[in-house]
Image (spheres, helix red, strand yellow):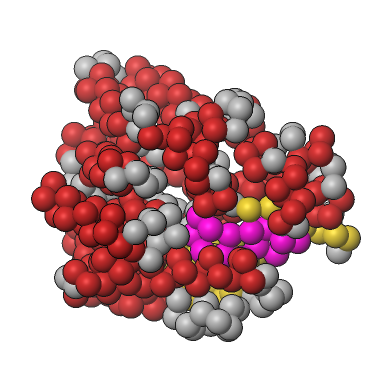
Amino acid sequence: MRLTILGGGGFRVPLVYRALLADPADSVSEVVLHDTDARRVAVIAEVLTRLGEGHPAPVPVRVAQSLDEALAGADFVFSAIRVGGTAGRIRDERIPLAEGVLGQETVGAGGVLYGLRTIPVALHIAERVAQLAPAAWVINFTNPAGMVTEAMSQVLGDRVIGICDSPVGLVRRAARAAGLDPAAFDSGRVGYDYVGLNHLGWLRSLTFEGSELLPRLLADDRALASFEEGRLFGAEWLQTLGALPNEYLHYYYFRRETLDSLRDTRETRGEFLDQQQGGFFERAAAAGGPDAVYALWERTRLEREETYMAHSREATGGWQRDSHDLEGGGYDRVALALMHAIVRNSGTRLILNVRNGTSVPQLAPDAIVETVCEVTAHGARPLPCGPLREDQLGLMLQVKAVERAAVVAATRKDRGAALRALALHPLVDSPAVAARILERAAKED
């Protein structure tokens, strides 16, 4: 089957290709890359060439010059675009920070600004897929993933599925902290109840062969301190919640501490990545062959992983990431597992971003939620989940209202909806602040 990667010049594309090379099923027969930046996609294609060297049957890679060429004949479309590049991300972060509210690419005002800029492009892609590859499955990793997936689903229905590596990373870390061998997770003997929105969800049950492990894990301060979310949120707060939150909920639960760590920062995450990745692509162009380019990419990737969510870790003691969380990837393995489950009609259970249906009765059936799904040849079906606590449901409802307002604003060019999306976000504390953010963003775009 043919896999098309939109945003094919993205820095993490080699992780996807590496997962394909390690796939014993050899399920992908060709990878097609497309990107609006010809220099970046040429460099990434060179990294893929190096990854394929020595492999008995490397997956052929082709660079498509146009979107339509890339989509024609695709069986799966992996969308990982960044509209506006890292320069756009810097604006999304700095504009809210100047108003004293959080600037982050997927959370708060920064996430709304990014969504407003990205949704029109994502909708165009969805429309071209519908025309040129109507039988293709679109796997969306473009951020803000929940918001963008919701917009694309208006065109593609259930044939677009959003993915994220945060939930599966949380489940794996929790299982390891509970004493389970990683092989147990891959065997399917580990069960879990996870529900929320993208970058806003909770692990509320963790079982091994039917036995519940989460209460014992939550009661063990030492075990909680052994993994990222335990250190990030602290044992007392996790025990109070009675659940393990997605790491991005740190921005909500500890907004003051995170904002303090960001307010006077000399370098936002976007600025770091702009310099790091910009430097990588400049040096790669003169590196002198696939070996040198690959070595440079690997060093840059490790630095990127080491600095992930650095401001949140700084706000909670400045601890370093664990070595097993620096491998990179996660989302690439989720994407491959999703493709396998559809092709094989396997009924595999994965945490995905899909239409709600009746999973959370308080949300609209077409609202995108992030939860445990069963994946077959017909796509991903969300499984029933237990009732949400009032605090969980309240936060989900408010942020979902923000996401849906942003989709309306982007598709209809509706300033009122854009203002509503910004002002109603729980991390934006004033409609006046929201209006100023919107006005400044319009001037700088």
Relative depth, front residue between 169 and 268: 268
Along the line of sight, which residue is nearer the eye, 31 or 228?
Answer: 228
Residue 7 vs 294, above or below: the answer is below
Depth check: give the residue in front, 282 or 227.
227
In this view of the protein, can residue 9 be seen by the observer? no
Residue in the picture at 28% in, 55% down: 433
Residue 215 vs residue 82, the one in the foreground = 215
> What residue is shown at x 57% (from left), y 50% (from top)?
253
Q: Does the stretch in magenta take in 195?
A: yes
Q: Is residue 76 magenta?
A: no
In the image, residue 68 lies at what x, y percent?
Answer: 19, 62
> At x 61% / y 27%, what residue is drawn?
317
Residue 304 visible to the viewer: yes
Quarter of the view holding residue 283: top left
Whole-percent x, y for residue 397 in the image: 50, 72
| Left or right relative to 47: residue 286 | left
Stretch in magenta:
191-205
Q: Which image quadrant for residue 271?
A: top left
Q: Using residue 363 as the reference point, say whether residue 67 is left or right of it.
A: left
Q: Quick check: 423 above or below 405?
A: above
Residue 118, image quadrant:
bottom left
Residue at 33 percent across and 50 percent down: it is 110
Report the number of numbered marks: 0
Q: Where's residue 44, x and y in %?
A: 31, 35
What is the chief secondary structure element of the magenta stretch? strand
